[in-house]
Every structure is written in structure tokens, then in C-alpha cells.
Amino acid sequence: MDILHAIATNNLYFFKLAKPFFISLPFPTLITTHESLNKKIMENLRSPVFPILLTMCIFSQISPSYALTHDYIRPPARGLVLSQHKRSESDPQQVHISLAGKDHIRVSWITDDKKVPSIVEYGKVPGEYNAMATGEHTSYHYFFYSSSKIHHVKIGPLETDTIYYYRCGGCGPEFSFKTRPPSFPIEFAVVGDLGQTEWTNSTLAHVGSKDYDVFLLPGDLSYADTQQPLWDSFGRLVEPYASSRPWMVTEGNHEIETFPIIQPHGFKAYNARWRMPYEESGSSSNLYYSFDVSGTHIIMLGSYTDFDADSAQYKWLQADLSKIDRKKTPWVIALLHAPWYNTNSAHQGEGESMRKSMEDLLYKARVDIIFAGHVHAYERFTRIYDNKADPCGPMYITIGDGGNREGLALNVSRVKLWTWTVEDIRRNPCSLVMAS
């Protein structure tokens, strides 16, 4: 069974994790050039060891368009898509769900009618709700904008691999979702810098065509950029997808939305609308948190809050990593917005300070994959640590072109080829996760 089955386009990444076992053994030399890598694959196809290595190690080509045919040229950015509210004031809109601790789901939505209660009715049969949960609500002001009532309700405990039907606020349409699988395999969809353009619609259509389990978004959601009605439009745009699968997000630079003196504190809209399970993971901030799902530990880091060794985020990450039992949770994945490794001229070096601060923590914990957005391109690397190829380091993948209005980042400013040799691995042995 493959431990990692991945499908990538230049704006969307699907990957499936299966149950691994642990083994240490010498590896053949792996090189990052496309042609030589293909040759090495062909040379080793008869080896009983190489199929085990293949699924873990072949993500080493550093070309933004590698996932597509080489003659494909993507058209420029398309126009903004605005989604209108077509329901009554008391009906839910912008419905989305997120994982909220073991066997629980948080349902979030907005109503224009401030009298609608923060309740969710749910059950296993359409139209029959044998359970109900009450939650909380909030709202916020941003200059002359006042948000509608924002509801957050945590429901559960829920059974795994089960379809639930639910209704928000006691009225309006019925929604449904399927809970996580009880064990491997589990499939994730990853999209960065989603926005709300015609390209976003295309990306979401691809997402909707797959039977994945959890959606991961490493920052830059709505591209509202202080224009608060765009947050509402974004919520309505993604509702058909975000109401049926958990959407787990972390913040990007377009979520900051500060303004000198008048709005000195950032992330007001993001924190009010996209409540994540930070408290459930022991974090003190909605800007960084973690969660477990089917043998996988996911860490959502904040690129735009403090991350040095004295920061709350650093200390939380240190404590969070120390709790992971790799026998029960063999896969550890991290997401952040500004990539630590980047060969594109766009946003060059913007993640370097965070890398210097936190890379060692993730390396020692043997994190498997780190996803980033911010750079509007697709790029993937071999396993790296401290700017050198390292078989014990994470695999880095940039997936930052979900549909943003700014277009593609097309200029590669630096191409560095990392190589592994047998001597490298002998000098720095580690236990790697393999396929059964």
C-alpha cells in the first residue's frame, strides 16, 4: 500500500496518507534534476527496496509547473467573483465546519437577524434531528462596517465515518457532512491563497470532484484587505464546500488588516469568522494551533505573530511536539503561510526569520511535510534541513495559487540543487517512515 498518494496541479494539492511502519536502511543516491531522477527510477525498478522509497522521496523537482505538462501556459488572473446573499435574514449563510477536538465538529455561520439562537440540530437521518447543541456568538466593527451575528457551535461526540445532517439556528436549509475515517487511509486537499476569482471557482470545482476528508488552507483566504463585505462574499462562495468538509485554516498576510492608530490590532475579521480549535490544542491564540485526525498530527503555524524563542507560539509548539507519540501518530504535517524555502523571486527570504527560529524544533520532531502558500506558484523540494539536503528533514511544498487576484509568480530567482549521497545518510542516520 502506498503511504503517500499525491495529485497536484499548479493550484491544488491532494495527498492520501496510509499506515506506515518504521525502518532504517541505507538509501540509494537521490538527485534533484528531473532527467537524472527518471534515470535513477528506471535503474532501481527491479530493486525490492526502491518501491518502498519511491513514495517518500520523489518530490524533489523544483519547478512551479512540474505537475503539469511542460507546454502548458496558464492564462493570467481572472476577475473578482462576488457572491450575493439570497436567503432570508434569519437563514444561515457562510456556513462552514471545522474539527474541534476528538470526535467533535464546530459549525460556524452568520445571520443578519440578531435574534436567531446559536443552536445546531443534527442527526443521522435527513430531516430528523435527535441531538442539539448550543454555542456562542460574536460580532465585530471595522471602521463603518458592522458584522452580522457570527455563530459558533460545537457538536458531538460524533461517530467516525458517518454522515450527519444538520440545521443551523432552528431554520433554513439542511446541510450535511461526513466525519473522518477511523483509521488510515485519510485524504487531504491543500490550497493556498484561495481568494474569490474565476480561478477560485475552478479550484473549488476540482476540490468538489474529490472524495477527500479534510481541507487545509495555509493562509490568505478572502483577499478582503480591509474591505469587509468581501469577507461575506467569500463565506458565501465557499459554503457549498466548507459546510460539507472540515476546513482547517491558518492566517496569511492578507488577513492582518491593520490601520495605524485606528485599527492597531490585526486579524479582527479572521478571528471572529474563522474560529479554529486553538483552545483544544492548548494554544492561547487562534493564529496557531494543532489537531489530530486519523493517525495524523497537523500543526498550523502563524507566520505573522511572534515566533522567536521567547514567544508564546514557540513555547506552545515546543510543548505540542513533545506530546506526540509517533507509534500512535506516525504522520506529522505542518502548515504556514510564508515559505521557509523558496526559489522564486516573489517574497524571497520573507520566511527566513521564522525558519531560523523554529526549523530546529520541527526537524528534531521528524516532521514529514511542511506546506506553505504566499508565493503564487507550485514548488516542491527534497527533504531539507538548514539549507542542505537531509533525509531526516521535512519535505517542503509551496501551494500558493488557489485563485488569488494577483496572478502567478513566474520568476525563479535562484535554483539550488540539493543532493543526497549514501555518505550523507550514514553521517546522519534516522528512522524514516516506509510503506508496508
Image (cartoon, helix red, strand yellow):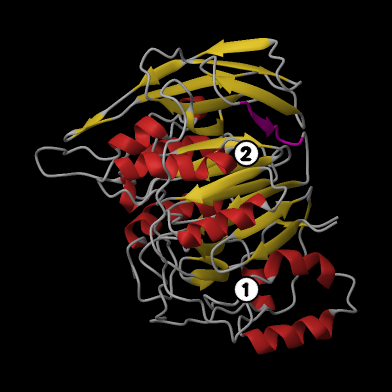
Q: Give SS at disc 2.
A: loop
Q: Which residues are the magenta region?
A: 174-181
Q: Is residue 349 toward the left or the right of residue 296 in the image?
A: left
User: Of the residues shown, which amino acid type is indicated by label 2?
Assistant: Arg
Q: Give SS at disc 1.
A: loop
**x, y percent for residue 378:** 52, 69
Q: Quadrant of residue 434?
A: bottom right
Q: Is residue 224 toward the left or the right of residue 372 in the image?
A: left
Of the image marks 1 and 2, the number of the one nearer the N terminus: 1
Are circles 1 and 2 on residues that touch, CB within 8 Å? no
**Given the current orientation, which residue lies at the most extreme left position?**
261
In the foreground, 250 or 390: 250
Q: Is residue 55 above or below residue 101?
A: below
Question: Can residue 241 be seen by looking at this rendering?
Answer: yes
**x, y percent for residue 101:** 58, 26
Q: Residue at x 45, y 67 (%)?
A: 341
Magenta segment includes 408: no
Q: Nearer the viewer, mark 1 or mark 2?
A: 2
Q: Is residue 374 above or below residue 264?
A: below
Q: Which residue is mark 2?
A: 245
* Distance CA(mark 1)–CA(mark 2): 25 Å
Q: Which residue is mark 1?
A: 67
